Image (cartoon, helix red, strand yellow):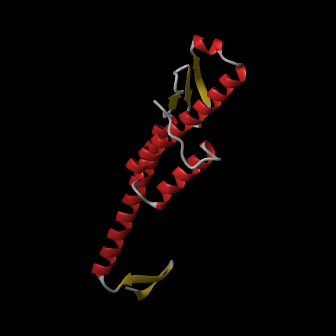
Amino acid sequence: MSPVAAGSSPLGRVEVWADDAALDAAERRLDEWESSLAERAARAKTLSATMRDLTGTAHNADRTVDVTVDSAGLLIDLRLDERIRQQPAAHTARQILETTTAARADLLRQVSATVAESLGDDASAQAIIDSYRSRLLPDQESNDARR
């Protein structure tokens, strides 16, 4: 409801709400909005902390290559079995790259689950997941990592 002029004061014109119920309702809506924003901010802060701790892991079919990537998809651990020495270096390099991609896909699955759990199925959740997908797997829609 719109305010009604009540007179003037040294500070200028004073207005009051014509309906106290409308004022109370407006205050309740503002309080609810503020509470909603505070809740979303708290969830976002928790989500951010959780996401920083995520890692993705994968190994190749014969388990000669194990890879772990951090929350940004960067390699943080690489373990090679001694059997690697019995194959050409180019084959080992390909296995490392493929397994790193699989570890990033594992990370993306974890990111997707964490975001969905925290934010549900809304536009901001999908935007976060899409952002990670474009950074982690720029040339692929999905890749199944072996754990």
Q: Seen from this angle, which residue lies furthest left?
A: 21
Residue 52 vertical placement versus 121 (above, below): above
Between 23 and 44, the residue placed more toward the observer is 44
Q: Quadrant of residue 100?
A: top right
Between 117 and 78, the residue placed more toward the observer is 78
Residue 44, image x and y in percent?
A: 46, 48
Position of the C terminus by quadrant: top left
Q: Measuring 58% from the left and 30% from the top, which residue is drawn there?
A: 99
Residue 112 vertical placement versus 11 (above, below): above
Q: Seen from this angle, which residue lies furthest front?
A: 87
Residue 71 appears anywhere in the view: no
Position of the N terminus by quadrant: bottom left
Q: Measuring 43% from the left and 42% from the top, which residue is drawn there?
A: 46
Q: Measuring 56% from the left and 26% from the top, which residue is drawn there?
A: 67
Between 48 and 75, the residue placed more toward the observer is 75
Residue 108, image x and y in percent?
A: 51, 42
Residue 72, image x and y in percent?
A: 59, 37
Residue 26, image x and y in percent?
A: 35, 74
Locate residue 117 relative to residue 20 in the image: left or right. right
Residue 112 appears anywhere in the view: yes
Residue 118 vertical placement versus 100 (above, below): below
Between 41 and 24, the residue placed more toward the observer is 41
Q: In the rendered picture of this protein, how many numbered marks are placed on residues? A: 0
Residue 136 vertical placement versus 9 (above, below): above
Q: Measuring 52% from the left and 22% from the top, which residue is drawn there?
A: 62
